[in-house]
Each structure stands twice: as C-alpha cells, then as structure tokens.
Image: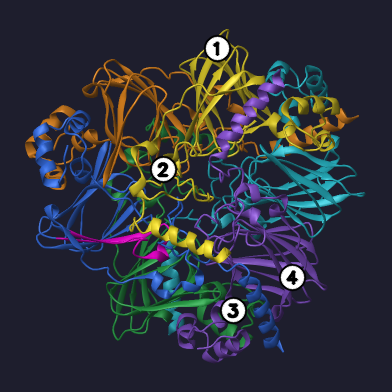
Chain colours: A green, B blue, C orange, D purple, E cyan, F yellow
C-alpha cells in the first residue's frame, strides 16, 4: 500500500516539474506546499508565477495583542511567497494609548522601524548598555540582529509604525510567551531567572502556561 | 552576600574585557572614516557608540529628480551607520503628478515597496515576462534582487511610497544615467543597444552625457 | 592482520552509510527533475553520479544572436549538473565582424572574460564613470557583479572570448530584450526612460515586443 | 638536475610573493589591535603568525557566576586569534550543586553541548513548545541559533560540560543581566514584560540595575 | 478580561498558522528521507519534531581505524538531525599507544580539538610552513578550514580528544584512503605525486586499492 | 617614539580617506597595501580606481614547475585587484609532453577547467570513488570545492588549459610541497601516512624538505 502511494507521489512530482525544463532563476517564488529547506522553500514552477506572487494586499491594522494594546500585521514569505530566498520582509504595528510591542527578539533578523504616526520610545539592550530613543514620524530606528528590544507608545494618542526585517521569515520570540505561555516548569524558570515563584505563577495564569 | 559576589564577578569580567578594547560584537557601527571592506565598514569603538548611531531623522521628502518628477530620500549605511553589516536599509519616494521612479536596478538588493499615499503602477521585467501591478495604500510590492524595475504614479494626485532594501548600501543604477549621463561613446551605445544615433544624442543632451 | 581489520572497518563504515542512502556531501550534483531551491537544486543520489556529471562537451560556437552578430554558448548548471551549489559556470562568445555582446547585466554574478582570438573592446558602467578597455589574447577583463556591461569586436577579423561567472546559473538580462521584447506598454517605457515613442516602436518591431 | 630547477622556481615564486607582503590566504589570524569588521578582524601579517595563535591553553574551570553557582570559561577569537573568520569557538561550564547556566541566548550562534561529568537538564524554548532533555556523559545537546535556552545541574554532584558555538565571537545575552543589570527604567520593563514593579526592583538590586 | 482577549488572539493566531502547516522557522530538523540540497536537508514537519532530534547519545569510543590505532565517533547531521543547516557538528577520537589521526583534510570545515586525556601532537600544514604543537588536557587546537592536518598520540598512555567542526556534515578526506583505497591507476599516482611505484603498490595492498 | 609613528599613520590614513565621503559600493578594488580581512582586502578609494584595475595582461605561459613539466600562471586578486570580494579568479596551465598538474587541492574553491589545446586526463577523488575523464578542446571539467585532484597530459603533444576558481584568492595546496617541502619530521609523516621512511627521505631531497 505505502509503496503505491509513494509511486503516485513520485509521478505527480515528475509531471509537475517537466514543465520548466531550464529551471527558474530570476527569482524563486515559494512553493509553500513543499517542505522548507535551510535556504528557503523550493521554487514554484515559473509558469505558475504571476504578479500577485509579489504583491501583499493586507498591510493594514492586524489582530490585537491585548495585554499590550498593540495590533500587529506581518508580510512574511508565508503570505508573500515572492519574498522567498530574498532576505527581507515587513510588519506593521498599530499602538493604542500606552500600547507596546513587548520585550522580544528576532534572532535571525535586523529590524528597521519607520514611525508613521504618533510618538514611540524604542530601545534595544546589550549586556553592557541600553540604547533608547524617543522617535516621531520622519525617524527610523535600527534594532541590530538578535538583540532584545521593545517599542512603547510614549505619546498622547495612538501611534503607527512600519517594520522591516532582514529575513524572509523572521523568527519572533516574545519573552513573556517563551517564559510563561508553555509548559516549562516553574522551578526551572525560577532557577534560571531568579524570578519569584509567585511572579511566575501570576504570569503563567495570564499567558496560558502550565507546569 | 550574593551582591558582593556579583560585583566581584563584574569587575573580573570588566578587567578581562579591557584587554581587548576594540572588541565589538553585539553590532558593528560603521566607522565611516576608515576604508570600506567587502563585508562593510570597520566597526567604531563601542565606547563611542550612542543611541543616535541607530537613528535616522530625515525620512522626509528628498531632492527632486526633475525630469521624472519624483523626490527621493535614502537611509543607507553612510547616513545611518548602525546599519553596517546588517543587510537592510530604507528609502522614500514622493511622486508628483505623472511622476515616476525611472527604469533602474539594484544589483545587490531586493526592494520592498509600501504604498503610503496615492496610486502607483509598479513592475519588474525578466527576459520572458513583465510583472506589473497597480497598487494602493495597504499594498506591498516586491522587486526581486537585480531585476530591472520602475514605479509610475498612475493616480490623479501625488503619491508616497517607502522602500526597503536587503542591503545596507544598495547600488542604484538608473538606466538613463548609465547610458546617457557619462562619456560612453555614441557609437558603442548604438552598437550595443541598436538605439538610433539621434535618440542617443537627444538623451545625452538631457542627461549630460558627452562622447 | 592489518588488512583484515581495515576490511572490517570498511564494512562497518559501509553499513553505517547505507542507513542514510541519500547522504551526499563531497558534492551535490543537481537532480534537474526536482524543483530548484534558493541554494540550488536538490542533489542526485550519489549512486547515480558519474564522471560525466562533471564534464560539459559542447564548449564550441553556439547559436547566433543575429542583430548583434555574435554566437553564444553557455555551460550553466542546467547543462553541467556537477556545478550545482558551487558558484561558478562558463560561457563562450564568437564574434563576427563588428559583432557585439549587447548591453546586459548578470545581477548575481561577476564575469571574467578571457580573450582567445581577435581584439575586443569591453566596458562596464557605474553611475559615475565608464570603465573601458581594448583587449587582446593574453588579457582578462572583470565585470563586477550586477553592473551593466558590453563587449564589442573592435578588431578587423572575427574574435573569440571565454567568459566565467561567479554563479552556477547566472541570470542574463539583455537590455533590448527586457525593454522591447515583451508586452511592456510603450507609454510606461516612454515615461520611465524618456525614449521617444517612435524609437520604442521601432525597436519593439525588431525585438518582437507588443503593447 | 631536477633539484636545481625546483630551486629556481622556488625563488621566482618567492620574489613574486614578496611584492604583496601581507598576502594571507591559508588563514586570517586576528590582529586584535585593529578595528573589527562585519566579517571579523583584519589579518595579522603571516610572518608574525606562530603555532601559538592556534592554541588556547586555559580550557579549565573559569570565574564563578555566583547567583547561579556555575563557572564559565570561553575560548573566543579575542583569546584564540586563530579562530578569526572561521565561525567556531568553545566554552566550558563547571556546575556546582543546583548550579545552572541562566536563561540566555546566543543570537548569532548554534550551541552544541557535550556533557563531560554529572547530569544536566538542558532545554530551549520556541514560541510554541519547550524542548527539554536530561543528559549525561556521552550525550550531546543542540541549541539552535538564537533560541532562548538554559542548562540546570539536575544531578546529585557537580557537573561539567563543554560547549561549542558556530561563531568565532558569539554574542552572549543573559536575560537577567539584560533586564536588571543596567539603567533600563522600571516602568519600561513593567510595560513590556508585565513583571510586577516589586519583582523588577528586587532583581535590579540583585543584578546591579538602576533606573 | 485580559485572559479572554489573549485566548481570542491565540486562536486567531493558530488559525492563521494552520494554513501553512509545514512552516518551520525556529529550526529546520533534517528530514533524512528527502534528497539533500546545497544548503542542507529539507525540514521535517515541526509537528514531528521532538527533543530527541536535538540529542545524540553515542558520544563514546567508536570503531577502530586499525592501521592508525585510533577509534573515531562522529555526530554529524545524519545522526543528529537537529544540526541541519546550523553549521556545527562533533567528533571524538580515542587514541591507543602511538595511535594517530592520519593525514587528512575537511575541505569545508574548521576543526577545533579539545584534549580530554593524555598528550597529543597536533599540526597543520600550509605551503610555506608547518604549525605544530604538543598539547594536553586544558588545551584547544584550531585546524583552519581545508588545511591538511594530523594528530599523533605523543604521550605514554592512551589519549582522548573531542573535535568540533564548522559544518553540519563535514567532508572527511583521509589521504591514504584517497590515494590508495580505490581504483586510481598506479601510473597516475606516480605521475602526480612522484611516489615510487613500489611504494604505491605496497600501500594499495594495505588500503585495498586496485588499478 | 612609537606613539609618534602611530599618530603619523593615523593622519595619513585620515587624509587618504576623506576623499571619498560616500564610500565605494559598485565594486571594492583591493587596496593591497592594507591588511586583508576574512571577506577580502579593504577597498581602494574610488577616485584612484581605473579601468586597469579590472584588466590582467599576462595570461600567457608562466613559470615551469619542473618535475611536473607544466607551466602555471595565475590571475588572483593580488595581481588583478578588481577581483576583490567577487569570488572568482583564473589560471592557465601549459603542459609539456607527459606534464601534469600534480595532486593538489583548493580548499576554498571549485575549479572549472577548459581544455584549449591537446588532450588531458583530469580527475578528482572522493573517499569512495575516483571521477576520471579524458578531455579535449571543447570540453569543460569541474573539480568540486576542496577535493583532491590532478590533470595529466595524456596526448602526444603539448596541451593548454584555462582554469577558473570560485574564489578571488584560492588556496593552492600541492600535496608534495605540503608533505616534503618543509620541516615536518619524517617520523610524523611516516606515522600519519604509512609511507616508508626511505620514500619520504627521497622526496624530501627532491622537494627541499628537512627534518
């Protein structure tokens, strides 16, 4: 039984690829149905590529991340397949009053933030120093690759920022979700952060963690 | 007790660090006074780095490129030294009525265009096909690395777009300037493009070329 | 005694290797039947690889590109699968009298040209300067990655040159084909290059463009 | 006869080499007196390179990081200059009873941990899952690049582990030092982590933070 | 209140994720059943990944390579699939009296050797110089990428060393196996190395070569 | 005394770089007077760059390597500075009767060989197999990066080949020079290759080795 299915898969694979004999080289639009590789997704057949593969049409306010009063939208390779293998992608943050992008890292991407509306206080942290700046429309801020950073709405009204990443599919690691949103045991968290057990349990209740 | 030990550790750490004063590793802010290298500028000493090295404050309408009725601004490593070695940078285009970003390439950078205001028609060209799309605010367009592309204001009013590049210092090669803005001889241009000599001379007059 | 032990080792090595049949690591010959990825084609099973995968036997005069009186041959990964993932490939140009390699770019590859016969005038163009040289057998010319370049037969007879690229599958973007060989509209070309409409229509007729 | 010719060749080789005295290509030992670049330190002149540039002699227990009861030693490019540009380095951890390597990231390096003595519980965290394993001598654990991770001594005695990094100079970002060891304001920490102010102030006291 | 909103966000996040089931980005564990690519193996579906994919449990003495009286063990991507795409791997050598790691290269990986027990003499060779050092526990030696190297047990007893490589799947090219373990003709070996025919035939007998 | 010299150096450095305020980005021609870096040489000021930096004029028969009856010429970055950072270079071999390029590796470069005249037998070796081919003008052979290879003149007359490398400054490691041309001790060579002592001493005499 299994062998038959594999064979069928093999033939469908062959037939879908005989169409572009000389391959794709001006770009490599992601075929999101095939497994990813360390360098990105395999390429769609060029005959199936259209201008729409290079256009993203929802760069508008996204879902609210409520405890932080911010709405986030992302245009990564998984929703904009023309970005595949090209090392760039985009995001948008809409900040409510006192809203913030919580403490997070993008281990594999530098982030460039353009302020579009309002006033933001943005910072990143190294082992020896905090780099902090209050910025307004007309300002751009850089968060170097892999560094812990945050953005706080420090103005009186709402704020909007666009963000750009030096990766087609940047990892996004929000500290609170990592520490308090899964089943990592309270004792391990306590030992490796020195946070109080009561603090850990309070935030686990808020972010859905168990253990 | 603990604090004392931490302090001791802190000092021993500091003293071991002072032995290699120029060690910079969380980032490498460009020292623009030193010669560039294939991987980017040498790093400024970390003691001279401030938050301002990561902030660009002129992301506003730039100089007009007159025959094309567009104003361009760039935030590359040479004006935002915190981008050094990080593979990302930004630009902004303000389009007058019928303005356009002329036919050009960025050989070493993918470009991501966010429409901020108005309506634009953006396209890139491969040897076999043109990928063309009319886009509005809320849309993002990708120009894959190295491909010839253009952006035309196809709306009734002005338009604004932000652009992001997968390079800290993208090359920008505007076709008309390359062909008609220098001393490349008319006969070579004619031989290698089949443009008419009269056309070449007319555009040389417009773009300042001699020869 | 020693030989026996070696043999045993050899077999244990073999048996541990058979568990991952597809492990290829000394090279990665392209399996051109499978879809490409941003880093190159998936690897053929090593058991199917032969010396012929690393040999190309048609490095002889190729097809004529007629308006330019030049014949071009390429040995890229699609015809020399042993090049896969290795970042190098080759081409050959045979120039007729007054023949030329037309204005073009290889966005992802530096090109190295070796003059084999005759006299050529080769050049590349940056936004600020033209780098031009007349060269003969015994000379090598470099066209840095992504820059617009051309080669003209400036001698009295035929000429031959070999070219080498820092990519296994270099993109080749001939300016005339990009501008005049597809359905890009005449008005967009006119707006973004300032070429006259009559010139555009004349070259579209020559290179097969519509629109 | 042959030897004479070799000698002649040898001298002509030498004389052609002496024209570029600093040509180094078999390796690039760091000249730590010169400023770093995004690809690593400039190379020492090969005439000054000795075998000692490739040897590190202090891979023994290091300084105690007291609140966590672990001693850490590193062999990075700054103390082993032969690693320059080569993308690998080493560390060693000696764990006291209940000791731990605290929650941290290496944004630019995968880490490979070899257990040498005792029993360790090692884990890394993704936004959706914790990957946790208790390991003993003969085991190796991988922490993929950029992910938050930790190692806890879960055995009854001391423990020793060697660590290897896919970077010559890996960034080391210990969470507690980042959040509580500098002058980042308590209100920003509270807003972007939801930690209680009292918790923040307690840990700032412990790790030396102000603000 | 807050918790409810978080839950809603969590579900909308989940639902947007389910549309691209195979999206893996925090790591790319090798699916060893699929063909390798120049950047590594395709990624296993994240739902099938477990902590065991990041753990190797056989870092103990390996098979004897008898003529050289050394036992070698490797933890490469093919036995530790979590290493895929991450550029690091490990090996272990257990040296008998007078044992040695024979003359070899890893063309694509720097090697870092940690002495665990005994005394070793380790060296690498450049065209102009031999870099040689006798090392003991507490010492680390670097063999820069691609250089011919060796390790000899120069102490009185057994010795143990751990090795780390800047590649997930380093090529290992032992000189004797390359020259004398296959069907390369004796005359070609003689012509290209100047070894005597009798010497070649003697070593072919020992290493299993024919021709 | 020292400080004064450093200061002078510093000022001369400053004055030589103030001339190109916005840096070099279309290419990075090597400034061979400055120390190399892992990514290549620092860039010459663009104002000092001329077309000659991109042209090499000695691609003619080179010095004889006598025992092997072959003449070699190289066009690497040190003699063709426009190649800097571009990952490509060239060489030429002129083979006498029975001449050969001896057994060697280029650890960091794939090599592509074009046969120009005569008949060559070219091969490379993996741990499991020899890939061997006899080739003539019109043929191209690939030696994948880092693999041990050789080229033998197997025709009746002289032969010529051009070679291209996927590195601007490829390492060239000729086996005989590595083993027998320096002061590596005979006993280490014997232990790590199993070559007979008499063979080693004979070849040391031929290649100039001591020890």
Mark closest to the chain's N terminus, 4 or 3: 4
Q: Which mark is residue D62?
A: 4
User: Alpha carbon of mark 4 to alpha carbon of mark 3: how far?
Assistant: 20 Å
Which region of the structure is painted magenta?
Answer: B71-95
Q: Which residue is mark 3?
A: D176
Q: Quadrant of the N terminus of chain C?
A: top right
The residue most toward the top is F156
Q: Residues within 10 Å of mark 1 (few under 14, many from 20)?
A: some
Residue C123: x and y in percent read: 30, 34
Is residue E43 depicted above or below B13 in this figure?
A: above
Q: Which residue is mark 2?
A: A43
Same subunit, tags 2 and 4: no
Q: Residues within 10 Å of mark 3 (few under 14, many from 20)?
A: many
Residue A101 in sight here: yes
Same subunit, tags 2 and 3: no
- Pointers 4 and 1 in contact (C-beta within 8 Å): no
Is residue B63 depicted above or below E162 in this figure?
A: below
Secondary element at tag 3:
helix
Q: Quadrant of residue D124?
A: bottom right
Q: Which mark is residue F158?
A: 1
Same subunit, tags 4 and 1: no
- Pointers 2 and 4 in contact (C-beta within 8 Å): no
Q: Residues within 10 Å of mark 2 (few under 14, many from 20)?
A: many
Q: Residue at x 44, y 62 (%)?
A: F11
Same subunit, tags 2 and 1: no
Q: Quadrant of residue C156?
A: top left
Q: Residue at x 82, y 41 (%)?
A: E100
Which of the chains bears the disc numbered 2? A
Q: Quadrant of residue B20?
A: bottom right
- Pointers 2 and 1 in contact (C-beta within 8 Å): no
């Amino acid at each position: 039984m299994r062998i038959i299915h594999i064979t069928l898969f093999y033939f469908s694979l062959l037939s879908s690829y005989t169409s572009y004999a000389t391959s794709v080289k001006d770009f490599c639009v992601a075929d999101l149905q095939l497994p990813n590789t360390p360098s990105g997704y395999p390429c769609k057949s060029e005959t199936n590529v259209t201008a729409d593969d290079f256009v993203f049409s929802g760069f508008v306010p996204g879902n609210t991340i409520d405890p932080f009063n911010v709405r986030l939208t992302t245009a990564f390779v998984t929703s904009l397949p023309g970005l595949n293998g090209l090392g760039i992608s985009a995001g948008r943050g809409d900040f409510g009053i006192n809203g913030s992008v919580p403490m997070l890292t993008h281990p594999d991407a530098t982030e460039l933030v353009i302020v579009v509306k309002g006033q933001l206080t943005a910072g990143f942290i190294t082992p020896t120093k905090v780099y902090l700046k209050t910025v307004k429309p007309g300002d751009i801020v850089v968060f170097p690759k892999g560094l812990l950073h945050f953005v706080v709405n420090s103005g009186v009204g709402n704020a909007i920022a666009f963000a750009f990443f030096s990766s087609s599919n940047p990892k996004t690691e929000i500290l609170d979700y990592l520490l308090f949103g899964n089943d990592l045991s309270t004792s391990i968290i306590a030992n490796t952060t020195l946070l109080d057990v009561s603090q850990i349990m309070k935030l686990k209740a808020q972010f859905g963690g168990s253990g």
